[in-house]
Image (cartoon, grey):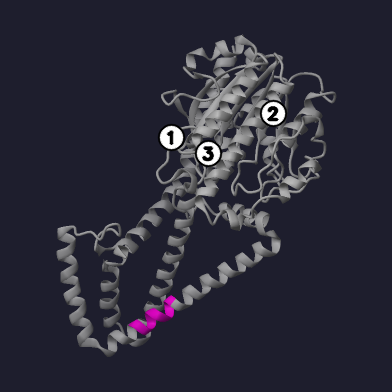
Amino acid sequence: MAAFLRLPLEALIAVAVLRLLPRRARNVLAGLLGAALAVMLIIKIVDMGFYSTLSRPFDLVLDWPFFMDAYNFVQGNTGTAGAVAAIVGIVLLAVLVLAAMAGAMIRLAGFVVRHDKASVRTVAVLTVLWVIIAGTGLRANPGGPVAAWSTARMAIDKVQQVNAGLADSREFAKLAANDAFRDVPPEQLLTGLRGKDVFFTFIESYGRTAVEGYDYTAEVTAALDAGGERLAAQGFAARSGWLTSPTAGGGSWLAHSTFQSGLWINNQERYRNLVSTEHTTLTHTFQRADWRTVGVMPALTYAWPEQDFYGFDQVYNSETIGYQGEHFTWVVVPDQYSYSVLQNRELGAARQAGPVMAEIDTLSSHTPWTRLPQMVDWNQVGDGSIFTPQARAGESTRELWSNSDRVRAHYRQSIEYSIEALTSWISTYGDENTVLVFLGDHQPAPIITGENASRDVPITLVAKDPAVLDRITSWGWTDGLKPAPDAPVWPMDAFRDKFLTTFSD
């Protein structure tokens, strides 16, 4: 209720201006003001949605593609009919709000004129009161200052945000032109990894809060310990640190492109500008150095022209990955199936000559964390149909998300599964020529982390060859699969150059 104990300056100015205008101009201005207020209300609601999922406000210039991502998420949980119905409902509601606010302002303008003397006195008294309250700094905590001008300030902030978004393109073009590895001869690249199969695995929503400081981290730590023991039994060792992601709660492709390019990609415009350049990526570097480059990306449900920019020889998307089981709500395939496809089509009997570099973008720990998969024997994975009973079991999204404690529990279980699937795959099929780098793409949504969580994610390098781990000694990373709280924290865009410098001559 404290948020409503506020005296908006904008309302006092609007009433004063409307009183001075002739009838026709007054009605036009009142309608425009009402529509403007409706637009600001809609933006505020969208901001609230972005804060709850991405821990930041909506960007009027750069964030429109997230609405398509939201549509895909709703479609994955409710079907096409449900997603279309949601869009129609949202559009109709927005139109209704616009019409209602415009009509209300026109009626208010008429009321002010009909009660002219009372309106003048009221505005005068409230204006004096606003000045006095503003001078004292009285606050209606947690609702902010009582003497408010938040709507005007929000409008100013959004205008400044638009200007900043437009200017960012020019700044980014200069950054992208600076590419330290573009002209390095191929024979000098990645010499410390020659003959190795190198895998970069992104574990969806695997953030710092999964392994540190929360009530569910003990179970995740136990899963990391078990995975470490599983790998150690096969002769593998690991080092771990932290990266700071450019995004939180969603927008995985921004993290992936930042990691790959060595550039800070924190909005969609930067992403679009990046993929229109010839900037060097990790994948392209491996391709130049004669690795076969593979992407396992089951979340891709559409044409992906970025394949050529990144430098992938082969990409397994939702259509080509060959999964015949039922989807786990929004999640297309369980992680174990993704690893099985890579193993069977690229690393086993079907292997082409030379080493393989692969990026695997996992999905099992993606929101909404319902109907979680379980491990099966690797020889039984097949075409994935074995997972269908698992995909049909458990709570629906609506049932689960009615209880935030259960949402956090399911999130934790999904991370445990993702860690188990990855470490089981490497311990089962890896050898002395296997090098694995796995990391989180971003922190989960605030329903998991709470407000004001960091954007740090764990990153781990696993190898059996001691020479590979010796090369990263100077990084100061922690032994094992879990980074220490005081392990180095790098911005995610620093990794590409660190990695290429360390493993190249």
Instruction: Tell me the residue at 50%/51% (across/down).
Output: 404
Point out residue 197 in the picture as x, y percentages from the top left corner.
Answer: 70, 20
> Taking 497 as reference, is 202 above or below it?
below
Q: Amino acid at mark 2?
A: Ala
Q: Using the numbered discs, state the Cα–Cα distance from disc 2 to disc 1 in whole angstroms.
A: 32 Å
Q: Which residues are magenta?
A: 101-108
Q: Nearer the viewer, residue 267 or 172?
A: 267
Q: Is residue 102 magenta?
A: yes
Horizontal and vertical percent position of residue 418? 63, 35
407 horizontally vs 124: left or right:
right
Name which quarter of the figure residue 32 lies in. bottom left
Determine the residue located farthest toward the right in the rendered image: 349
Marks 1 and 3 close (CB-CB < 8 Å): no
Question: Where does label 2 land, which residue?
Answer: 358
Q: Residues within 10 Å of mark 1 (few under 14, many from 20)?
A: few
Assign the magenta stretch its main secondary structure.
Answer: helix
Side (left or right) of 392 relative to 457: right
Q: Amino acid at mark 1?
A: Gly
The secondary element bearing badge 1 is classed as loop
Q: Nearer the viewer, residue 411 or 139?
A: 411
The magenta stretch spans residue 36: no
Give the percent coordinates (x, y) of residue 107.
Answer: 37, 84
Viewer can see residue 204: no
Q: Which residue is mark 1?
A: 213
Quadrant in the picture for residue 108: bottom left
Q: In the rendered structure, which amino acid carries the disc numbered 3?
A: His
**Dot 3 lies on which element?**
loop
Q: Identify whether 322 is placed above or below 106.
A: above
Q: Nearer the viewer, residue 107 or 285?
A: 107
Circles 3 and 2, Cβ within 8 Å, touching? The answer is: no
What residue would you read off at disc 3? 442
Q: CA distance from mark 1 to mark 3?
A: 17 Å
